[in-house]
Structure formats: structure tokens, C-alpha cells
Image (cartoon, helix red, strand yellow):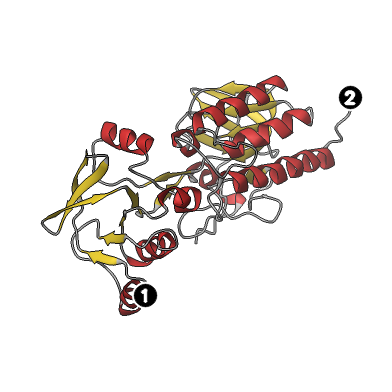
Amino acid sequence: MSDSSPSAAAPAADAPAFDADIIVIGGGPAGLTAAIYLSRFLLKTLVFDRGGSRASLIPMSHNHAGYPGGISGPDLIARMRAQAEEYGTRFVDAEVRVLSACREGSFVATAGIDYRARAVLIATGVRNRRPEMDPTFHDAALASGHLRYCPVCDGYEVTDKRVGVVGTGERGTGEALFLRGYTTDVTLIAPDGAHDLDAGQRACLAEACVTVIDGPARDYAIEDERLVLTAAGAALSFDSVYPALGSDVHSMLAEMVGARTENAGCIIVDTHQRTSVPGLYAAGDVVLGLDQISNAMGEAGVAATTIRNDLAEARPLRR
């Protein structure tokens, strides 16, 4: 666990004039939900969006409430951004590369030029680790549903279908057993050579009738409406394949100003989404918890309300 304190961060000696009351870093569901709330709280809100939110890669979400028939990730993001802009949120389509804490408690976000705010919300999310495949092929397989990353989101869509899980160990075992609740045909394939499974994991997989095959998993292709790969010298064919390879947490900016993170890199927050650094908040997948749009939006609503009240306590908000 990283246990950096706010005093460990080097403060910015000189800071530009205030550009916003609050800077939101991240343009996914958490960041955009927070922006809608914050702007409706009449706070000057600036969102940095470098693009590439995981939500923007979802071909169709069927478990997001209020959209019978589903809604695509890009459509949802576009609607949320338009709603935030309607209430006055400003957007900078750029990546924040440096975040600095100033002596008097404000923050400076550097994205080509410096922007200053009284508080910052980190909503930078995570990035899934991908199997070894051509990026163009990856995106096409994801769009067609042959490649899937979230069994909580779309396990329903593979009901009674043939499913492959590329992974091993605790993560791979857990995902294979979760998907076994939807279909009798689940195969767990090691990504790189022999499986790393203990006796208990192998026993659970055997009891659930999950087929276990050593890797490496390579040579992905789509043939006859199925995703085909090779493993253990054989060609395997699936309706959908789930990579269970983990993810990388985008918590670097929070760590720059001394925020505490847990072992996997997720930002540690209290029940009101405050980090260990005063004035710094976090919401969404960058925080440890259920990686779901609904959860990210809920955390963002809590964070935005906390930010509004914390800023008002420091300096009353008056019209």
C-alpha cells in the first residue's frame, strides 16, 4: 500500500489565476455525472477528457437502467457530455500530465498550459489488459461481441453459448465460474504456457465442469461467426472470449500529490469520496469497488455533493 501523505507532494511555488472552482479529470460516466451535478450546483466546472473511456468501447449496454433495448457506450457518453455542457461545464480535450498541490490548498493541472482550481476530482478509470492481438482486430472483435471484458455487464448475452476465458489463477478461475452460471460450455485457457492454478482452484473448476487448457493463447481470428484461437497445439472456437488478464489503474495523478492508494493502485477514499489529500476526490473505476457504470455514477453524485459542501464550508457560496 502506498502511504504517502499530502506533505510528501512538492507544492507549486507559483500558480496561475483560478480557472475553475473544480477540475474534473476524466470524461467517462463518473466524470460526466459529477460535472452535471457540479455545474447545477453553480460551480465553475472544467473537465479534462483525453478520450478512451472504457464506456466508449461498449458496443451496447443492456443493464443500464432506463434504456430498454440498450444503449451504446459512445451514445451514452455523448448524451452525458451534452447534458453537462447544457449547464455550463467547460471541456478541455487534452490529457492532464501533471497535477500539483499549491501551498494554500488549491491545485494546478498541467495539460500543455496550467489550469488552477480549488478542488480536483479524479475520474480517470482503468484500462483492461488485452490479449496479444492486432489492435484493429481487437476493436472489430469487441464491436461484434466475439470479445467481451465484463461478464457482470453482458454475461446474459452468452447464455447457453460456447465461451472461452483467457486467464489463470484466482482471476481466471473466478471469471470462468461466474460465466458457468450462464452456460454449460466454458473453457479456461492459460494466456502464456501452463496454468497457474492451485489444487483448490482446479477442484472448483472440475466440479463446475469447466474445461482447462494450457496456453499460450495465440493466433486469434474470426471464422464462421466464431472467434478462433490456438492453444496447446489445437484450434479452439468460441461464440465469445473473455480476457481475464486484469487492468491497469490510472491513479498516477493522485499519487503525484500524495494520495494514498492500495496495492493494485486504486485510490483510497472515504465514504464521501474524499482521498487522503484535502481538496482531492476520486470516483469511478479508479476507486476500488464494482466496475460498473451505475456504480461510477453513484460515486460521482456523492463526490460532487461532498465537493460542493466542502467548498461552501471553506468559503460560503453566495449569489
Give yes or no for contact between labels 2 and 1 (Cβ–Cβ under 8 Å): no
Q: Residue 146's x, y, as percent?
A: 33, 42
- Amino acid carrying label 1: it is Cys
Furthest residue to the right? 319
Q: Quadrant of the C terminus?
A: top right
User: Viewed as shown, does residue 95 lie left or right of 65?
Assistant: left
| Pointer 2 local density, CA inside 10 Å: few below 14, some 14–19, many at least 20 | few
Confirm whether residue 260 shows in the render.
yes
Label 1: state its secondary structure.
helix
Left/right of residue 31 with respect to residue 93 in the rendered view: right
**Mark 1 neighbour density, 10 Å: few (under 14) some (14–19) many (20 or more):** some
Task: Please tell me which residue is depicted at 37% across the width and 40% down the height of the picture.
Answer: 145
- What whole-number distance in Å separates the C-alpha atoms at marks 2 and 1? 62 Å
Rendered position, 91 above or below 3: above
Foreground residue, 93 or 318?
A: 93
Residue 301 % position (x, y): 70, 42
Q: Residue at x 20, y 63 (%)?
A: 214
2 or 1: mark nearer the eye: 1
Task: Give the image location of residue 102, x and y in percent.
Answer: 63, 37
Give above or below for 70 relative to 231.
above
In front of the other: 315 or 139? 139
Mark 2 secondary-structure assignment: loop
Residue furthest out toward the front: 160
Mark 2 residue type: Arg
Q: Which mark is residue 204?
A: 1
- Say which residue label 2 marks: 319
Can residue 283 be seen from the camera position used here? no
Q: Residue at x 44, y 47 (%)?
A: 157
